[in-house]
Image (tube, helix red, strand yellow):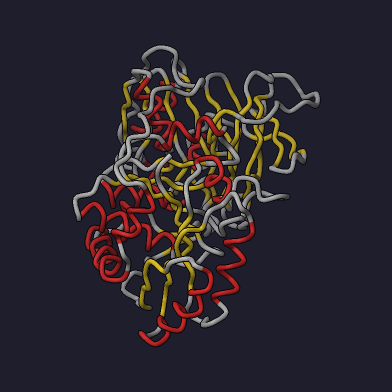
Amino acid sequence: MSGLILAAPSSGAGKTTITLGLLRALKNAGHNVRSAKSGPDYIDPQFHAAATGRPCFNLDAWAMTPARIRELASGKGDLIIEGAMGLFDGAPPDGNGSSADLGRILGVPVVLIVDAKAMSQSIAALVSGFANHDPNVRIVGVILNRVGSDRHTAMLKAALVPSGIPVLGAIPRTDALSRPSRHLGLVQAGEMPDLDDFLNTAAELITKSVDLDALRNLIGADNDVGQHTSAPSDAPQKPQRIAIARDAAFSFTYAHDLAAWARSGATILPFSPLANDPVPEADRVILPGGYPELYAAQLASNQTFMQSLKKISQTSDIYGECGGYMTLGETLIDADGTAHKMAGLLGLTTSFQTRKLHLGYRRLQTCTGAKTFAGHEFHYATTLDAQGQPLFDVQDAEGRDLGQTGLVEGRVSGSFAHIIDEAPFPPIAKGRVQA
């Protein structure tokens, strides 16, 4: 497998901005470049896709089998994988699912991005420690970020000479590449009107500061490692019409799901609840996660959308994840305490008036025991009331019982968990309430 992982000792080192600048710089130079993102992340892949013009797949070493990861990583061109958190950071208790796990599974090297803002000779101990921590994880280069001057850069490079690990670039401190944020992280790619300028500015900085030829030599550029040929077993067995909500309120959809549905022959029918679009006639309707709490009043007033959703629930399967799940409920209370009437298809009342972080990987098994999935949860909403049949039995990454989550009513179902893939671990063994 050809490619490389851009990782760091910790979060906040500048991985995403450097990755975006590198992707756009390679694209602008005429190279065939594609990307992937480690772990469960919806926002960064949108920026990757904007930088390259190609879909960005998530590669999740906790939620996917090695075979599935290799399939999604296959393709032709320069593969750049953006790591998550620190290189060896993953799910508790042992760090399973880390970016380092991807390196082991794919056999690709790692370029370590180090925030050198408050560091000089100590960088040698840090880089050597990471390089020698695991012989199966190959660190083949370093990119120094937020260096203060040429003299600072020279000190850092001199300190790293004994390690034998080449310094591929040194990026100066700048405020030009900062991005706005909100409560779940950075704003989405579609919400930045100056995104293209941002990407080109990042590309110019990377082109000046990083040896792109040396970095591409580490990738094994333009090596064809196969195309996607298989579809996951949960893909539709026959062509279907799948209506998917897509707008600023509902945007958290994984590219690997869209690709699998396309390969199965399904017709994807996007629609916008915020634009008050009626739900298209379809076999399945999906309301993805996103930020419905920011648009709750608008959604509540969009009766063409709401009424069509209720109508199609009689003849089609509807599934909502996180924000989509809340929209299927009775009431959504925003941060100001205002209650907004939602679709009323599930007996659910949720609130943002009291924020509580729900975060982590989830082992999900339908309460019938029919299917198991690997998922992830990340939200601040609180469930005030949930009446009806639960959808999933749940465990966390450590196998601890979290009870039941989600609801199912007729052909309508949903939960706060974002499904990543079919579960790469055994089903939940303990007895459960049957649907």
Q: Report x, y in % for residue 138.
A: 53, 54
Count every numbered label the image shows and give the total: 0
Residue at the far top: name it. 238
Going by the image, does 229 lie left or right of 434?
A: left
The answer to whether residue 272 is above or below residue 93 is: above
The answer to whether residue 113 is above or below residue 184 is: below
The answer to whether residue 78 is above or below residue 154 is: above
Q: Is residue 378 visible?
A: yes
Quadrant (top left, top right, bottom left, bottom right) of the C terminus:
top right
Residue at the far bottom: name it. 151
Image quarter of residue 201: bottom left
Q: 344 or 17: which is nearer to us? A: 17
Residue at image location 34% in from the left, 18% down from the top: 265
Image quarter of residue 89: bottom right
Residue at image location 55% in from the left, 58% down from the top: 85
Q: Is residue 296 visible?
A: no
The answer to whether residue 4 is above or below residue 140 is: above
Q: Report x, y in % for residue 389.
A: 67, 25
Quadrant (top left, top right, bottom left, bottom right) of the N terminus:
top left
Residue at image location 47% in from the left, 46% down from the top: 108
Q: Report x, y in % for residue 424.
A: 62, 30
Q: Report x, y in % for residue 324.
A: 48, 38
Q: 54 or 123: which is nearer to us? A: 123
Going by the image, does 365 lie left or right of 157?
A: right
Q: 17 or 335: which is nearer to us? A: 17
